[in-house]
Amino acid sequence: MGYRRAGFDVVGVDLEPQRNYPFAFIQHDALTLDRRFLRSFDAIHASPPCQGYTPMRHAPGAKGAPLLIEQTRAILKAVGVPWIIENVEEARWAMVDPITLCGSMFGLGAQGCQLRRHRLFESNITIRPPSPCQHDARPVIGVYGGHARRRAASAGGRGTRDVWEGGHRAAMSEAMGMTWATCAEMSEAIPPAFTEHLGRQLLAHIQSSRQDQAA
């Protein structure tokens, strides 16, 4: 949704069906898409699976989770269009000069709680955050595991399930800015405010490059 708000026509690709995805969708392994097809797009965003980079990699169901950032980067470099790779903070070691985006930079939150949701973004163009993090003393809302959880701003760790006005989905939707998604989908999602910010920078780069080529 964020890239659409920035001005792009969006086509999503995922190995699993995404019934609530609001745009054109291709169910396919993104790593095996034909590169000529990939070059038909003005820009590409890729979010390789994060589980292998997090403490979840030790969980019974996540052992052997793939580390695909390097392979994804190699494909995107070969395709040659502007691109962005997203992943979690624990993947910093595998990324090249990533920037961090935080919900506090965009005023995200719900029911008196601040959404932070740090994510890393690497690109082959110059991208910048809108500001430093704006962490404050409000409790933090975490969106993961299909639930919204509240914790003290100073805690840093994961909290326990809490009662939210309207239920977990209402709190998660407000915090993430994703009214169409399920709780499970929001648990794995990037807030659209993040991708709208990045999309505007991508679009400006594309338009500038075209003007230079036409000059």
Image (cartoon, grey):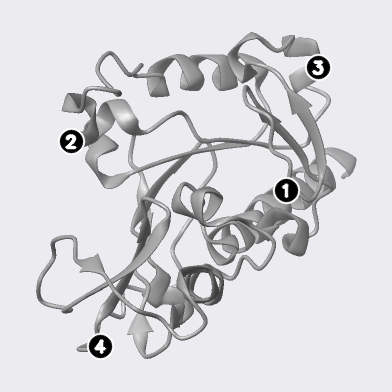
CB atoms at circles 3 and 4 under 8 Å apart? Answer: no
Residue that carries the numbered disc 2 in the rendered image: 55
**Between 198 and 109, which is closer to the camera in this rendering?**
109
Q: Residue at x 37, y 33 (%)?
A: 50
| Residue 101 horizontal side relative to residue 17, left or right | left
Residue that carries the numbered disc 1 in the rendered image: 20
Q: Secondary structure at mark 4?
A: loop
Residue that carries the numbered disc 3 in the rendered image: 37
Residue that carries the numbered disc 4 in the rendered image: 138
Q: Position of residue 29 (x, y in %)?
A: 63, 16
Q: Which one is earlier in the sequence, the residue at label 2 or at label 1?
A: 1
Q: CA distance from mark 3 to mark 2?
A: 35 Å
The circle drawn on residue 135 is none
Rendered position, 76 above or below 46: above
Q: CA distance from mark 1 to mark 3?
A: 24 Å
Q: CA distance from mark 3 to mark 4?
A: 46 Å
Crowding at label 2, few (<14), some or many (≥20) Cα neighbours within 10 Å?
A: few
Q: Which one is earlier in the sequence, the residue at label 3 or at label 2?
A: 3
Q: CA distance from mark 2 to mark 1?
A: 28 Å
Q: Nearer the viewer, mark 1 or mark 4?
A: 1
Asked if residue 94 shows in the view, the reply is no
**Between 8 and 140, which is closer to the camera in this rendering?**
140
Q: Residue at x 75, y 64 (%)?
A: 5
Q: Position of residue 52 (x, y in %)?
A: 29, 25
Q: Nearer the viewer, mark 3 or mark 2?
A: 2
CB atoms at circles 1 and 3 under 8 Å apart? Answer: no
Q: Which one is earlier in the sequence, the residue at label 1 or at label 4?
A: 1
Name which quarter of the figure residue 192 lies in: bottom right
